[in-house]
Image (cartoon, grey):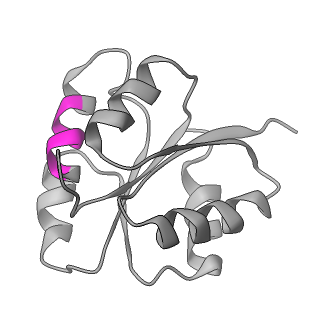
Amino acid sequence: MKKINVLVVDDDFINLKLLKTMLMKNELVDNIFEAKNGIEALDVLKNSETDLILLDILMPVMNGIEVLKIIRSEEKFKNIPVIVLSTDETKKMEALENGANDFINKPIRELILNEKIKTYAFL
């Protein structure tokens, strides 16, 4: 079975650890890359083979919407599925309008995360 590489972008250490723990249990996930802000996320993207991005919206340095706009504007990254993560429901529409494939409300439930991964893993 083919497996995917997932980039998790979140400035909160606890959220990063929680998502990584959930992803390690998912049989579809091979490698997990981490970034604490948008700048790190773009660096990781340039230096890795990423199949799916889990992207927090509210971050310092560069927020998730800014990262999303850059991802969608670059040929190499524009087709990578992006699932936006946030506690702010009002950001959902903005994220979708800027190219996010989907949205997960925080706190993240493992069952929902796994369903989204199944949906977007092999697009």
Q: Position of residue 116 (x, y in %)?
A: 55, 63
Q: Quadrant of the N terminus?
A: top right
Q: Indicate whether residue 97 is drawn in magenta.
A: no
Q: Position of residue 60 (x, y in %)?
A: 18, 55
Residue at image point 64% right, 60% down: 20
Q: Position of residue 68 (x, y in %)?
A: 23, 42
Q: Quadrant of the C terminus?
A: top right
Q: Position of residue 110 (x, y in %)?
A: 63, 78
Residues in magenta, as a range: 65-70
User: Image height check: is 72 above or below 112?
Assistant: above
Task: Indicate left or right for 28 with 49 as reference.
Answer: right
Q: Looking at the picture, tell me which residue is in the foreground, 89 or 122.
A: 89
Residue at image point 43% right, 42% down: 81
Residue at image point 44% right, 84% down: 107
Question: In the rendered image, which quarter is residue 94 located in?
Answer: bottom left
In the picture as drawn, the residue positioned furthest to the right comes out as 1
Task: Indicate left or right for 41 with 18 as reference.
Answer: left
Residue at image point 20% right, 80% down: 89
The secondary structure that dominates the magenta segment is helix
